[in-house]
Image (cartoon, rainbow, N blue to C red):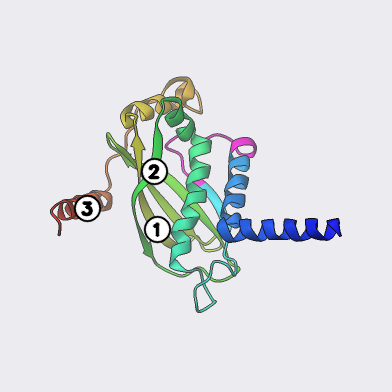
Amino acid sequence: MIYYYLAIGGLSTMLLIYWTLDLHYFTRMGLVYVRSRFMKKRVHILDQTKVAGLCLTTDVDYLLTHMNNARYLRELDFARADFYQRTGLYSAIQAKGGAVLQGSSTIRYRKFIRLFSIYHITSKIIYWDGCSIYMEHRFISPGDEFVRAIAICKQRLLNVDVEEIMRDLLSGEKCPGGPEAAGYTKPEIPLELLRWMESNEISSANLRNGC
């Protein structure tokens, strides 16, 4: 009888965890961390990283044929985690007592990702200022290299100076590739990013004014 109660208790605990936590999300995030930390090579902070994904039945919308819109932004969490680990960005932020969070994002959908289709997500830094780092992510089908969606995300850094963090990662021993890869090569701000930043400023001003 005791085994019966133990089994019921164990099953109840598992169901409680399943209902209160997104187990798939946290399990996958853990796997991404292990792979990027121990199984993939480190890359330069301005390099582009790539992760693979698969559209499953848990990702589709009510039509049951392609990935729903919300899943695209969720997938970017895994892509950023891989990028943070492989470039050393997150370690550099933590070493200075800082933190990073998502400030804003925008995404443009071009062509849907079908159920059971494999896709790649590329991630790279396209600009930074005194407070934030701006990243571009692309969802690409591996066969024809078609960009199915493109997103720009603002990563807000707290309690650290972004310029200092980037200088450390672009020069010296912290720069993968050695002295040949070192150098403070801040990219020019893309026009679409500039306009998006202006839009965010207008939105912030409207909210402050109670609009």
| CA distance separating discs 2 and 3 | 22 Å
User: Residue tagged by mark 2?
Assistant: 101
Q: Which amino acid does label 2 sit on?
A: Leu
Say what amino acid the circle numbered 3 marks: Arg
Comparing 49 with 101, the one in front is 101
Residue at the extreme right of the image, as rendered: 1
The quadrant holding residue 94 is top left
Secondary element at tag 3: helix
Which circle's residue, 3 or 1, is located before the other in the chain? 1
54 falls in the magenta region: no
Amino acid residing under circle 1: Ile
Whether the magenta-drawn stretch holds residue 42 is answered as: yes
Alpha carbons under labels 3 and 1: distance apart: 16 Å
Q: Which residue is drawn at 15% across and 56% down?
A: 210
Q: In which quarter of the image is the C terminus?
A: bottom left
What is the C-alpha distance between the residues marked 2 and 1? Answer: 20 Å
Q: Which residue is painted at 39% across and 43% down in the image?
A: 101
Percent x, y of residue 168: 40, 24
Q: Name the residue under label 1.
A: 150
- Which region of the structure is painted magenta? 37-49
**Percent x, y for residue 189?**
27, 43
